Amino acid sequence: MSAITREDVAHLARLAHIQMDGEELDRMAGELDVIVDAIASVSEVASQDVPATSHPIPLNNVFREDTPHGMLTQEQALAMAPDAEDGQFKVPAILDGE
Amino acid sequence: MTEQNYTPDQLIRLSALQMADLLRAGTITSVELTQAHLDRIADVDGGESGIHAFLHVNTDEALAVAAEVDAIRAAGGLEADALHPLAGVPIAVKDLIVTIGQPTTAGSKMLEGWMSPYDATVVEKIRTARLPILGKTNLDEFAMGSSTEHSAFGNTLNPWDPARIPGGSGGGSAAAVAAFMAPLALGTDTGGSIRQPGAVTGTVGAKPTYGGVSRYGVIAMASSLDQVGPVTRTVQDSAALQELIGGHDPRDSTSLPKPLEGLLTAAQQQDITGLRIGIVKELQGEGYQAGVLERFQEAVKVLEDAGAVVQEVSCPHFGYALGAYYLIMPSEVSSNLAKFDGVRYGNRVVPDGGGTIEQVMGATRAAGFGEEVKRRIILGTYALSAGYYDAYYGSAQKVRTLIQRDLEAAFDQVDVLISPTSPTTAFAFGEKLDDPLAMYLNDVATIPANLAGIPGISVPGGLSEGLPVGVQFLAPVRGDAVMYRAAAALESRLEQQWGGPIWQQSERLAATDHSQTAGGDR
Amino acid sequence: MAAVTDEVLSFDEAMAAFDPVLGFEVHVELNTKTKMFSPAPNAFGDVPNTNVSPVCLGLPGVLPVVNGEAVEYSIKLGLALNCQIAETCRFARKNYFYPDTPKNFQTSQYDEPIAFDGWLDVELEDGTVFRVEIERAHMEEDAGKLTHVGGASGRIQDAAYSLVDYNRAGVPLVEIVTKPIVGAGERAPELARAYVTAIRDIVKNLDISDARMERGNVRCDANVSLMPKGSTTFGTRTETKNVNSTRAVAHAVTFEIQRQAAVLQSGGSIVQETRHWHEDTRTTTSGRPKSDADDYRYFPEPDLVPVHTTPEWIERLRAELPEPPAERRKRLKAEWGYSDEEFRDVVNAGVTEEIAATVEAGATASAARKWWMGEIARLANVAEKDIADLGVTPEHVVEIETLIGEKTINDKIAKQVLGFVAAGEGTPRQIVEAKGLAVVSDDGALTTAVQEAIEQNPGVVEKIKGGKLQAVGALIGPVMKATRGQADAARVREIVLEQLGVQE
């Protein structure tokens, strides 16, 4: 079912925003192929009538009161920023459209 | 009580609850106790040949907290009476858990130097109870690994054999506790990261029922699987520590509404007459080291002799657990780790000649994450991507249901399940580093508990070729108390057989540099 | 970067050849006190990065917790849009990287929205009602705010760098998605405007949003496609993002119809893409085409648990709903008996609620309209204030009417009294008493004043005695002057005639 190609990995790396060179793409493709082969068996037993479990313990309606608390100061917010200006986080230009 | 003088080397080998008793009795001070551990860290953790369990040692703050506890005790009165039973007993914290005033790295270059402006809920609880925090312990990067070899900051050595791995991801916490650098430590367990290190270092590690301990402030690996738990040398210590860190937290939506209670009491009970114990048919045999299976079978015999009713039960879908885990976990990882992009915090990497924000994010994540983390992010991105979701992530979630059903059926027949914790004892450094799949197979026995949200604990079951073997107990959701009861019963009977705690069987761990004349036999 | 000017067909030509299909995604920012998943304040216009908690910044280790109030607001909105409310629904993660999105995923709802399958009747200017089908309304969170610095235009395309303020990150949003809207024809732009206006009025009326479009509280993405007349197969659509006024929505729809018609007419095909709206030129330009980067890898949010609703909960919220704005207006107009024009003027003046409260408090609809649209509006105008901020309440107006009914004051004095009320000098009755403004109804005092007027105006008296009764007015004036306007003019007339022995 798998056979993950280098192009597949390149696409996934773009989605995941991880820069990878050719060698890395090849290696990753090989490794993922082996892993996916080993784990793809899950679909054998996942028949239509089995419901999916997203949370191990079934809870529901966990809500918070609408009361403000727990704020950081601007100084705290920006303390660990790689780059900041005028009380804001500074990032390089964004060319990818809005 | 007769007054005894303890050398620092004797002190650090006591259980946390014994230390707490001595503190309460005024026999020792918390400063003395904390300093003994800091000295031990200085002796065995640093340098070329050190164990390297700690990424950061919190000397000043730990001693300051210890001094506060001593002052409160000395002053007496209501405040002294109100002290938590474990107040003054030092603790180590896995470096996946955020702390004000100490760096939190998650074992990653991405976060090197990052200081959290807030405390995790479990850290708040530790501070409120006044346990001096000794420092932050090493781990596989973002808790991804079974050997701590995936830490960006170097290996942690197994105190039983420095050529071997201490397990992972919580190898630092387990090694710190095994080598008497801390009596208590916090770990996190997503697929066995508390229990497997416990097994291979001869310590106790427990993963509570999912939601039993708050995850707020614990850097998420896989949100639906992660759980914080205790790492200790005795079952009672684990129970006491889980009681301290557990309970409902309004900041964690998946936190159980009611606390899990009576854990320490259960661990003190000892009587397991009539307790129904199930051996999981699927968690033995092929792939399990012979010595591991031998110790496991002996443990079962010990429990039977103690009055437990043992039967074999089958969990037919456990064979699919590893597959489901290695789809769900990376999927959640791929999303949870997206926030590390060098915009708000973390180490930004700008490509030569600058670049757009997309290029900067790409370079930051390429440089900041290690191989295993990247592998899991890519795998998770794949499992969630259009066209594959149903076959992979969707199917894995259905397998999760099937595993829960297997366990429900099993717990209709028995009170607790038992299995080896890990298929092998500690392996050598590098042995599985280039074979991700072989590394993943280490988690085969621990993973079902995370998928189903049930509690699990690993306790020392003896040695195989001189290395510790772990025995795992699993209990139903919210069944943490019965899990502790069963584990403590096995622990005490095995220690009777051995004539003391398992570490006494290690010359390396039993030996002290000082003469053992001071004080007396315990 | 010079914008490419698109060819357009005239609107009439476009309509002759094509039928437009519309769709809207309207984002409504809720006015809860805190954010959707973080306890930080939900407030506009504060110093950057001050309304943030560790959760808003996506710091390592944080977890979201749902704001219960935001869920109730969302259910109310769903009910107001005639939707079904989900018995159970979940949150999901929408994964994409963008610096205004602190976690690099948006917590949203995917295949399980809180509300679905609704409709909204939208009234066009001529009273035609057009039913818009609502596909879903789901809960999600807003992103932070980016400011593009450097470059000539401040636009993203030529910015040197960008600054990020996360104050808005995590503000609760409800996204309302319509089903494809077919059959609007040439009224498509008008319908677009009316639909967004209706949504804005509903959320304002529910008091779940500040509903100020200029602040981005209500934002609209407009989907437009064309199909050749007679066809029932939808064409390729474009999505024009962030059209943030009701007027602009109409313009954007108009432009896209004209542009797409020109493309199709010349044998081209429409690219499925997002379009950017430019208010200055009233045009759209090409944004990002759909690509494989749009694989959002939705999956259930593991850090949040499902929301379960019960019929009891939903009915409690339904009982709290105010009357829908359109229905309320229709009802009030009928009850008050206003003409179309009168009612429109009242709505435009923004005093519908004041009049409703005044009528509720006991005044007649015509009296309420007279005061609110007359003297009070004039006072507000002079003071350059909103009517609501003037300090005159519906209760004041009712008291004025009562005083007039008792003949304690007349209309002229009433206007003076309102001026004093607006100046904050008290209630109308307090002011009348304190300032001695009551109408003079003491015949003795009036008779004296009348006699004086008779003595001083012999010529007028002659005329009256000669049968020219309309000359009485010339005597009323001096009497009113002598009594500083506090006389009842009708009574003065009676006394004059009495004194002169003239019969009506």
Image: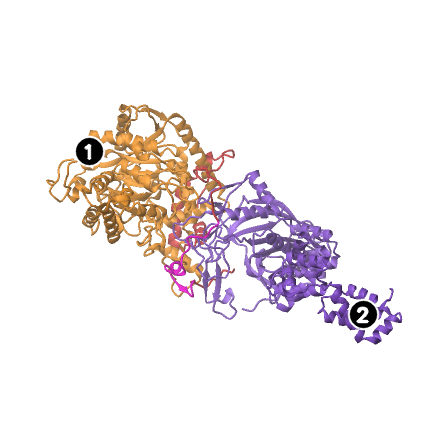
Chain colours: A red, B orange, C purple
Residue under the image location 38 percent in, 55 percent down: B366
The magenta-colored residue range is A66-88
- Which sits in the foreground, C24 or B331? C24
Q: Residue furthest right?
A: C466
Above-or-below relation of A68 to B422: below
- Which sits in the foreground, B132 or C367? C367
Can residue C366 be seen here?
yes
Q: Residues within 10 Å of mark 1 (few under 14, many from 20)?
A: few
Q: Is the C-beta separation of discs 1 and 2 under 8 Å? A: no
Q: Residues within 10 Å of mark 2 (few under 14, many from 20)?
A: some
Give residue B450's position: percent from left, percent from top. Answer: 38, 38
Under circle 1, the secondary element is loop
Magenta segment: does it hold A67?
A: yes
Location of residue C495 (image quadrant): bottom right
Going by the numbered disc 2, the residue's amino acid type is Gly
Residue under the image location 50 percent in, 61 percent down: C45
Say which of marks 1 and 2 sits in front: 2
Q: Name the side, left or right, on which A2 lies relative to B370.
A: right
Disc sitting over residue B500 in the figure: 1
Q: Chain of mark 1?
A: B
* Magenta: main secondary structure: loop
Give residue B449's position: percent from left, percent from top. Answer: 38, 36
